[in-house]
Image (cartoon, rainbow, N blue to C red):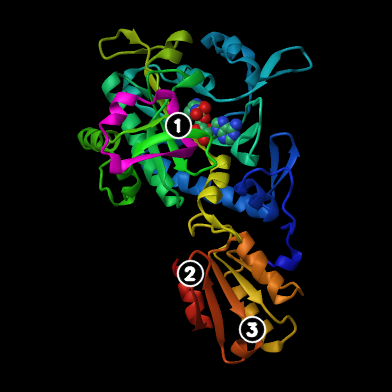
Amino acid sequence: MRLSQSFIPTLKETPKEAQITSHRLMLRAGLVRQTTSGIYAWLPTGLRVLRRISDIIREEQDRINAQEVLMPTIQSADLWRRSGRYDAYGPEMLRIQDRHQRELLYGPTNEEMITDLFGQSVKSYKDLPQVLYQIQWKFRDEVRPRFGVMRGREFLMKDAYSFDVDYASALTNYRRMLLSYLRIFQRLGVRAVPMRADTGPIGGDLSYEFLVLAPTGESSVFYDSTLEEQDWLAEAVDFNDPQALEEFFNRVTVPYAATDEVHDVEAWKAVPSDRKREGRGIEVGHIFYFSNKYTESMGITVSGHDGVPFHPEMGSYGIGVSRLVGAIIEAKHDENGIIWPDSVAPFRAVILNLKMGDADCDRVCECLYTSASQQFLYDDRSERAGVKFADADLMGHPWQIVVGPRGANAGVVELKRRATGERREVSVDEALTLVMAS
Ligand code: P5A
């Protein structure tokens, strides 16, 4: 994309309404704009990040054989009356009436809808297990929307739902999902620690939250530092082997880690003091096992191997996709701006033309740009070098390819790595190879 023609409205001033770094940087880098309280429009760069996060989530969910669906955002109130949650959900639910005075709502989550869809189509234990997921907008009329996309009212969630014949197989799906989540967050370039948590309005009796550690997080957390050091991608756990999953789950969830809501002071005492970590975290994922809470209340049965109907066991598994954009920035920034991990960056690199109109600069830049124009941002504005450097740091592209007249004449560019600040002079070809390999 050519910056001179793009819609990336960066701001020089720090917006007054933004209280935390990620919110400030998202507005300044032109990723989002608020349209009304707690509701955001995603501009081209922000949308690219949202898509890259979604793509990684999809790959990892597909890997464990979860199947993608897309459910509507608008749901009928009757569906929620069947589970008994219509009244229980309270003022966080946005309730709507259509022209025929039928009661509808903007879905805050989809347990009811997926349970109903499942019940319409699955009649026998032979069709189990099933794991379905979607990436779809949700609405929760939060009392205090704040911190930008971190606690919005409309937000993008990946929500998955599992259906199983019995407790043992439900637990296997739950553990599989936990492993999938650990892989997802690591691929997104952040450390998310799994912690025992409260279940809230979703219900059930087994629940883990995934928290990105950051001082601006809304949750207080207590955890054993060994959890920070794991390389989950290096784990060769076979997703299809229930025993391997159980062994893995036990290994991961034994070290102490809990949010303040379920903090166990006695268990905390047993953690060696040099490994005790207390701090704050941003909840980026939450997984639940709730047995047959929804299948039972909504009257959904399938026939068992003995012919006797039963209510399938369920779990649900959420990731805050739009919140993650904020959480990644909270974890990855410096005083100059965002530092995107390669895996989610909106562009692989920015090309900085330090002297627009100089024949050598223009030629080298065009040559670089046309080699992968969809993945590069080309700063072809007639701005001072200082402005271009500042904007590049603010926007956080993993690489900056700096093209000045003297170097360009000799076929040389300066390559800067945003995360480390390291700079080196390389040939145009070498620059391309390094950038494309990361
Ligand atoms: C799990 C999937 C659920 O709703 N039902 C379907 C379950 N869980 S949850 O914990 O309530 O939400 C899942 C994740 O969504 C993100 N999230 C939010 N993100 C931005 N703004 C909000 N107001 C908001 N509320 C929840 C969180 O990351 C949460 O873990």
The nearer-to-camera label among 1 and 2 is: 1
* Label 3 secondary element: loop
Kind of residue sitting beneath label 1: His
For label 1, being within 8 Å of ligand 1 is answered: yes
Looking at this view, name the residue that lies furthest to the bottom: 410
- The residue pinned by badge 1 equals 286
Q: Report how far apart the C-alphas of labels 1 and 2 lie in the structure.
A: 34 Å
Q: Is residue 244 above or below residue 350?
A: above
Label 2, residues with CA under 10 Å away: few <14, some 14-19, many ≥20: few
- The residue pinned by badge 2 equals 436
Write down the quadrant of residue 152 in the picture.
top right
Is 265 included in the stretch rendered in magenta?
yes
Q: Quadrant of the N terminus?
A: bottom right
Kind of residue sitting beneath label 3: Gly
Give the camera-side residue of 400 and 96: 400
Q: Earlier in the sequence, mark 3 or mark 1?
A: 1
Label 3, residues with CA under 10 Å away: few <14, some 14-19, many ≥20: many
Give the camera-side residue of 257 and 292: 257
Kind of residue sitting beneath label 2: Met
Q: Is residue 409 above or below residue 22?
A: below
Label 1, residues with CA under 10 Å away: few <14, some 14-19, many ≥20: many
- The residue pinned by badge 3 equals 404
Q: Residue 55, how many percent across, how many down?
A: 50, 48
Q: Residue 354, how many percent across, how many down?
A: 68, 79
Q: Residue at x 28, y 36 (%)?
A: 255
Q: Report how far apart the C-alphas of labels 3 and 1 lie in the structure.
A: 48 Å
Q: Residue at x 41, y 18 (%)?
A: 204
Whether residue 220 is visible here, answered yes or no, is yes
Span of residues in magenta: 260-285
* Label 1 secondary element: strand
